[in-house]
Structures are given as C-alpha cells and as structure tokens.
Amino acid sequence: MDSELVPLDVVRDGSDETVRFEQRYRGVRVFGAHYLVRMDKTGDAHKVTGAGGRFLTRLSVPTTPRFPERLALEVARSRVIDQGGDGRDLTAKSGGLVVVPVGKGVLAWQVTVNGLDTRRRQPLLTDVYVNAGTGAPLFASSRIHSAAEGALVTSGTTVRGKTVPLNAYQRADGKYELRDRARAMWNGTTGEVLTYDAQGRNVFDFLGPLPPDTPLAASDTPAFTGKAAEVGAVDAHWGAGQVYEYYRRLGRNGLDGKGGSIRSVVNVTVLGQPFVNAFWDGTKMVYGGGGPDHYSLASALDVVGHEMTHGVVEHTANLVYFGQAGAMNEGLADYFGNAVQAEVEGIDLTDPDAGLLGETFCRTAPPRQCAIRDLNDGRTAPADYVGATGRIDNAGVHLNSTIFSGALWDIREKLGPTADRITLKALSEYMTPLDDFTDGRRAVLAAAARMRLGVRELLTIAHAFDAHGIRAGWEHRIPTDHDTLLRDIADPGARPAASGDHYVVTDSTPPAPPAVYAGRVSGGRAERLSGPEERYSFSPATDGGTAVWATYTETGTTWRIQVWSRPLDRSQPPRLVHEGDNPVFDLAVEGDTVAYSLWDPATRTSDVWVRKGDAAPVSLTPRPEVSSEAATVRNGRIAYVKEDPGHMLIVTRDLASGRETELPAPQSPPNVVGLVSGPVLTGSHLVWLQDAQRDGGQGIMRANPDGGAPTVVSPDDASAQDILAMDATDTAITYSVFPDLSVPINENLPKITQIPINGGTPVRVTCNRGEQGEFAAAGGTRVVWLDGTAARVDLATRARPRGRC
C-alpha cells in the first residue's frame, strides 16, 4: 500500500483516548495530513467514538526528486531574500522530502533558512517548501512563533523586585544554577526545567540547536539576585514552572505531553542592541534581555505562557504557521498565555485589562500602551480580517490572531476555566495542521459536546464565534474597486511587470510549476509565454514588446539556471540568453538587450551583466571587491546600483559609448555609508531612492537619464517614509510604504501611492482594504498590482488613481 498512518501521539482525558496519526506516502511524510481516532476506554476495552482529520486517498506522485537538493537551498534562500532577509547573512539547510497535498500531491524539499531581517532587526528562521520536481517555491512558514539529586528550593528576585521561590540545583563547585528537577516530569534522566543566560549574544546564534557553550543562569548564593534578576532569568525560570503546573492541572505533562525537558534562553540581543521580543523556535523559548524602556519579555507571565503554548501546539495539532491556521496558532498561544496569568495571579476576568497580552513588560508605559495584543478588541472576521499575502507576517498570523483568540476569550469569560479544558481538548483531539477559522470553530464545539456540556454551554460557544464573524463563507463578502486581470494567482513568488498595454506575470495551476503569462492591461485572455519544456519560471520583465524571465531547467542529468527572451506576440520561440549555475535576479530588457544580476555564493556578491543580441555578455562590475544589482534599461541606457568598499552609488551608463555617470549617496553624518536603491529609467528621467542617514526613511530623487540635473522629488529628511517598492513612468511615480504592523489593521498594510513625476500631493491608487503587494507602473498613471483583499491574490489594475479613500 502506498499510504500508511504512523502514530505520533496519544492523548488521554479520563476515559477518552485520542490517537494522532501522520500520513506517510511511500515512506515520505505528507504535509499537514493528520488523522485522529477517538476512543472510549473502559477497563481493557476500547470503543471507537469518532475519527476525522486529513487522510489523502488520491495521492499519486513520484517520491524520487528530480530537482537537486543543492539548488533547492538556493531557491529557498532567494525566496527569503524577497521577503526582507539580508542575502549576505542567510544560511539554508535541507530538512528532507515531504509530500505537499495539492492535487495528486507535490514532492517538495523542506529547506530551513535562517539569518537576519535587517530591516526589522529581527531573526529569521523560515521553512521554505520547494517543488522537488521543478524547483518552484511552493510556500514558506516561519518557525519563530513570536511573543532530584542536588535539587533544592531557593529564591530569586524578579525584574520588578518581587521575591519568588525557585527550584534550582547546586553544582559540585558549590554554585547554584537554574535547573529544576523537582517537577513531576523529572524521571531521573530527563524532564528538567532549564534556564540559560545568552550573556548578550546575538539572537541569531540561538536559531536552531542551543550552542553548547551557553551556560545555565547561575549564582554564587542560593538567592538569585543581581544579574540573574536584571536579565529576566528569574522570571523565565519561575514562569516556566508556573506554566508547566498549569498544563499539568489540565492533564498534560509538559509541552510535548511526555515530560520532555523545558528550555528557556534569556538575555539575547540583536546586533548588540536590545532585542524586545520573544519566540519559540521549535525546541526552546528565547527572550530578549530588555533595555532602557522594557524589561525582559520573560517578566510577563502571559508572554511566557504564550511562547510555551507554541510548544504545546507544535506537539498536538501543529497548526501551520501561515494564514488562518497560523492565526489560530497565535490565537491559542494568546488565549492560554492569558489564562495562565489569570489563574496564577488571580485576575478577575471582568477587569478591562484582563484580555491584554504582555501589558506588564514596559518599564514606564501604561498597560494598554504596552500590550502586544488585546483579546477583548472585538474584531470580527468579515470586517477586520487583515488581507495580507504571504509576504507579510506569514499571511497575517499575528495580524488576525485576536479574531480567533477573542472568541475563545469570550467563552472563558462566560464559562470560566472550563473553557481551558475545552480548548485544550479541541487542540489535542480535533484540530489538524491545515485548519482554518471555521474548522477551529467546529473543533471547539465538538470537544465541548464530547465533554457532555449542556445545550446552554454549547450555545454560548456558538454565539461567541458568531460574534466574531467566524462562520462558513465569511471570506467571500469583501468588496474591491479594481479591474481584475487574473484571479487566484497561485505562485507565492509572483511579481508582475508592465509597459504600455502589456503585462507579464508568473502563475501556476498546482502542482504545475509557475510559468510566464502575458496579457493586455486593457483586458482579455492571458497567454502562456514560456515554453512547455521549461520548468520553474520567475522574475519576468518586459519593455512592452519583449519579455525576459529566468528558469530552473533540467538539462540532461543536471539543472541549470537560465535566462530567456521572447516577443510578447509569440512570433518567435524563446531565445536562450544565459545559462549557468549561479542564482539570477533583477532582470531588465529593451529589444534584444537583456540585463541581469548574478549572485556568487562563494564571494557573497553580485554583478550586473548585459547581453545585446548574440554578442557575448559583459559584466559591468568585474572587480571582485565591487558588487552591483538592480539594473533598469531604457533608450540604450542602463542604470544600476554599485557598491564599492565604503560607499554606494547609482550608475547610469550609455551602452553604446560606455560613458558613465556616478551619483553617490550622500554620507550624513560623514561616517555613515548612505544607501541608494531601486533605480528606474523612464523615457525622460532616472528615478531612485536615497537614504543618506541610513535611518530607514527614504527620499525620492530624479535626474536626467544621463545623470544630469539631479533633484529632490520627495526629501530624505525626518518626514521621509520607509519605502518598500517603487516604479515610475514619465508621468508619475508609484510607491508603497513598508507596513506599520504595530496596529493590526488593513490600513497599515502596504498601499499603492502615486505622485506626479515632478512632485506634488500623494494620492491612493486604490481604496482596497487589503495588501497591495508587488506592482508595476504600466504607463501614464495606470498601475498593475497583486491584491490580497478578497481572501485570494488577484492581478488587479486601475487606469487612474482613486484619490482619497
């Protein structure tokens, strides 16, 4: 038999026993395919009372990969770079093969990418799933789920000066360390609560296995004061014990349900600066050490409960950290974090601050200003669901969590701690990895019914979900104001390009790999442009008459990265422009002139190459210490970003004569290397972004195509915005601003804004409430973009900006 069920876990709740199975297809695990068998045990007899979940019976997919593992690592790495990762600091590691349950199944490589998101100054630890037949990235999911012998009872001082009892351990040298072997899970070998001190090291050193040289938080005396108190070690250790006992009262022995050791790391930084965050990475909790305005996040018991609950979720339903399933993952962590705090600290749920998460970790800010989220924010799915695509917050896992957790918290306010048992039973025995909000509602109601709650209690639960708009079909009632060119873009890395009345974009019908499609902005059918022999196609660009794109293509027994060119009218077959082993990005085209950037993994630099017709390609920056990227071509001229040691600049070059003009970024202050990015050549102008202070705010600059007469369109001063992307025509400059996700509402997602080419008042292109992600300026004021508003990704367009919204 091709498929089998492998047991993962058994959950026992009185006479109820639930066995959780994972499906394997020809020995390869099936992503998200969990099947639950529920039984009633009386004596030695077992009676099956229910079963459900996901068992895929129509899988038919080869389990031998065609796309090599080494290239899958580069594809995954490039995917994360697109989402804000610093390419120079990212590493990729294979996690093996998995079958993704799309159609008859897609064999995929699971690749874990870690490093640093330099824009957000946050760590990255992301699983990217890459089609093992074609090399196309399928989707990505973050692993960072943000916010005895010798044993003795000691004491410690929390960051706020409160004395709490601690279970610690005295070593042979007489020192004491935060090692708790006094809990019921300790079996003489494992089952400890351990708290480590990162001693100010960078947070990305702690993504993955715990560095073996990380010490346990220690003290010379039985009283843990001083540094152990200041960095949050006492809070983390005490809090972990409280959360363990809370779950033990609910019948669960530790995060894994099997009494496995619980590890916390405190006092991490990010690039030497305070790390004001916390996360569960799959094996441990990691907490920043605080700073002048914040205590360590370990000082907030609800945050400790939140992060530890991510461990419980991972060992039960393992809700995928993406979209609605990820928002449920976050929502359950919010719920149980607050439930732990309410129980341990005796908080009355009628307190208006009872639903706040993390309200106490600020040194001076009041609770409501400090809180990370509010479970009593009253948000509903139809009105408030944040329409993020996969490029932001894993499609809204934090932005939408309080819709689900708010319903759960309403239930707790009505039913009290009984709601904790219902919710844990639903998580452990009824939910599966790919569930959405509606599935979550059904799971909670099914768990409550199995617990034999009365009709009144079941109605209370149903009314709570109703109040938050969690009903079947809610996603399909959201208005938009655009013309739709293509619906349901399935390529997660899709990025449109446009010129005049023509656009190109990648799309796919899973499990087929993304292909390049071309169409008219004025409407009509899109036609496939890339050839059928090609595999994963990406990064298309067009000048309105010709398109270029890159592919991963199987050639004999090897895979090569290729660049292709073809007329939009398909009058000629695709022409091979480049073939090699190194990753390709930032394609540009004008007629038979093609520009592209090549990344060299050995030197961790990139270079812009130009090829005209059948002539040999030429590197514009052949010196090994010089890097270049982001080329744009127009009217026989190319512009690109060049980075010399110690400074960055925009270069504009006449391709016929080779004459260049350099426009360096100002350095203000003088010891700061100013940034330039995103050059665009229009018919009459060169436009680019500039951040002289390197503070994140970017001004918009304009010059003649040859670099003459540079002028400011939008100043790079204290009012400058953090621009996410930009494109331009001779008429207008279109841009989007990096999202402000501090308040989880649609208004704070990227919105497309437009200003006249000579400057003026910015206006909105569309009033759609969701994310307007990747976009391209087609001509005049017309824009083509990917829109996530309607619970799907549409390729959208408008001829003129909407104006005020």
Image (cartoon, rainbow, N blue to C red):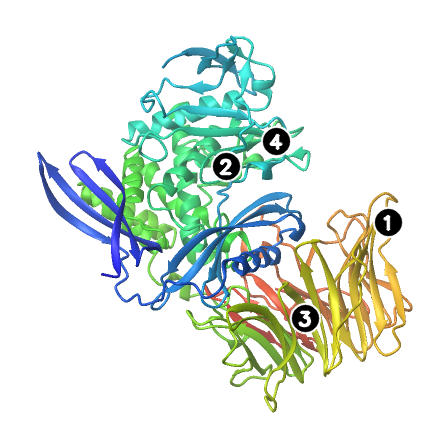
Q: Which mark is residue 640?
A: none
- Marks 2/3: CA distance? 38 Å
Question: Residue visible at 54% across and 67% down?
Answer: 787
Compared across the picture, whether 186 is left or right of 368 comes to left
- Residue type at mark 1? Gln
Question: Residue visible at 80% across and 69% down?
Answer: 639
Residue 360 visible in the snapshot: no
Residue 603 visible in the snapshot: yes
Whether residue 467 is situated above or below residue 357 in the rendered picture: below
Alpha-carbon neighbours of circle 4 within 10 Å: few (<14), some, or many (≥20)?
some
Compared across the picture, whether 613 is left or right of 258 comes to right
List the residue tagged with mark 1: 667
Between discs 2 and 1, the one toward the N terminus = 2
List the residue tagged with mark 2: 209
- Residue type at mark 4? Ala
Location of residue 24 (image quadrant): bottom left
List the residue tagged with mark 3: 587
Q: Nearer the viewer, mark 2 or mark 1?
A: 2
